[in-house]
Image (tube, rainbow, N blue to C red):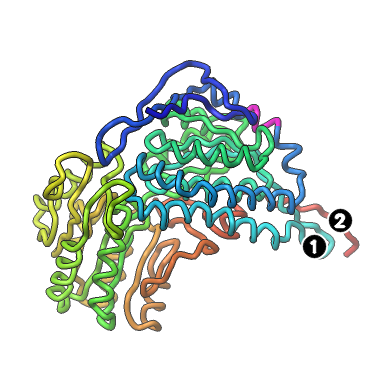
Amino acid sequence: MKEYLQFYINGEWVDPVEPRTMDIENPATEEAFAKISIGSSADVDKAVAAAKKAFPSFSETSVEYRAQLLDKITAGIQARSGELAEAISSEMGAPGWLANAAQVPAGMGHFATTAAILRNYEFEEMKGSTLLRKEPIGVCGFITPWNWPLNQIACKVAPAIAAGCTMVLKPSEIAPLDAMILTEIMHEAGVPAGVFNLVNGDGPGVGASLSAHPDVDMMSFTGSTRAGVLVAQAAAPTVKRVAQELGGKSPNIVLPSADLKTAIGGGVMHMMNNSGQSCNAPSRMFVQKDQQDEAIAIAKATAESVQVAGGMDAPKGAIGPISNANQYQKVQDLIQAGIDEGATLVAGGTGRPDGLNQGYFAKPTVFANVTNDMTIAREEVFGPVLCILPYDDVEDAIEMANDTEYGLAGYVQGAEDEARAVANRIRAGQVAINGSSPDFTAPFGGFKQSGNGREWGEHGFEEFLEVKAVLGAAAA
């Protein structure tokens, strides 16, 4: 069993103040394969103190120095990409092909993209006689999830380093190993002592302490809306900045002008990717009612073609297990709720797929004749479960798409001009038209209870900057 029993504080690997350990389970086998230490508020205090001490000097480093650090980290991820992919597969269940093709490259991509943004960013601007300066916000606390672990760490750590901030990271205790490897990479890249610190632990023990800490200037959290509320409440007394990327129940509107085979098949596969464990997954598919029978047939065939398998040798395109036992049970309960509330089960259902007797594997599931008041249409399932909702006309589809407490992402398929017009009316932070690819330079974040602030690209970088106005800096 692998053991990662130390934390990274002030440029060194150190023992926890109070020894306490936790086993890390492989969700494909339900067996423990690694052990980490669980930290406490005392460990958080040490890490924050190190970050606070390092901030004055690091905040004054040059743009090119910080850009070169990002370059070195990018190269380090590339050099250890196979090791990172194996860790991610083991800790959260992503099949090897997905870990290698998406999970690791996404994390690496954020470091590379941020380096390019940094080198071209203007930190000072004159407005008449006033100088506007962009300055690093200070010490940042990060809490990251298990579903895209390296990606979610990278889109916080990279812009924080670029801005000149210092930080303390609490990665998910369910999927912490990729973070330990990244920490080794950052150490080898020469990140100065105290700039980056890592303390493993759970939400009550480490996350709450970090959120409430008076010497933390900003909290950036990715996870459930429920947990995001707790982070904001803990942070409120110290009036620190809080950036949150939370849950989603993203609509996918298939317009009558869309090619159904492409739109429906692509929508199903997108939903099943990463076993449905993506906050921006297109989980509500809206289809014009006269086209629903054809759409159901395509969705059924597509879902039933999806292979389910775990490990590094899983076939390309296969989906892996749900990442932990609690989430697996939630997915099963919500599938049963869909059945109980009268939705039409088109494919999948409760239980494991045939031939799999261990592991948290869920069946690729499709429901049709879903109404927007059903539990499966309201709650974020975070599993491979797609809802198909019929609509009368496009106005009806837009109204139902926006009838949700979430607003992270949206999708529209159909004739380009019409799709763009519909996209403009979806209340979400990011809307993709006709299967467009991800863009690491585009801002990512939500409306409503999907969060506040943005990650990725220049907008994500600016979350880590304060604006200072220096009046009378030059003659008017």
Name which residue lies at 43% across and 57% down: 447
Which percent across, then down, holds residue 83?
45, 44
Q: Which residue is mark 1?
A: 126
Q: Is residue 51 magenta?
A: yes
Which percent across, then down, holds residue 413?
32, 75
Q: Please identify the residue farthest to the right as the structure is shown.
A: 475
Is 296 situated above or below 112?
A: below
Q: Left or right: 459 with respect to 400?
A: right
The front one of 92 and 229 is 92
Name which residue lies at 57% across and 23% down: 14
Identify the magenta region.
Answer: 49-53
Q: Left or right: 289 with respect to 380?
A: left
How would you rate the neighbour count of disc 2 (Cα within 10 Å): few for under 14, some for 14-19, many for 20 or more?
Answer: some
Indicate the quadrant containing the C terminus: top left, top right, bottom left or bottom right.
bottom right
Is 91 situated above or below 312?
A: above
Name which residue lies at 72% across and 40% down: 58
Q: Left or right: 83 with respect to 341?
A: right
**Snapshot quadrant of residue 372:** bottom left
Give the Cα distance between marks 2 and 1: 9 Å
* Disc sitting over residue 473 in the figure: 2
Question: Tags 2 and 1 in contact by the CB under 8 Å rule?
Answer: yes
Amino acid at the residue labelled 2: Ala
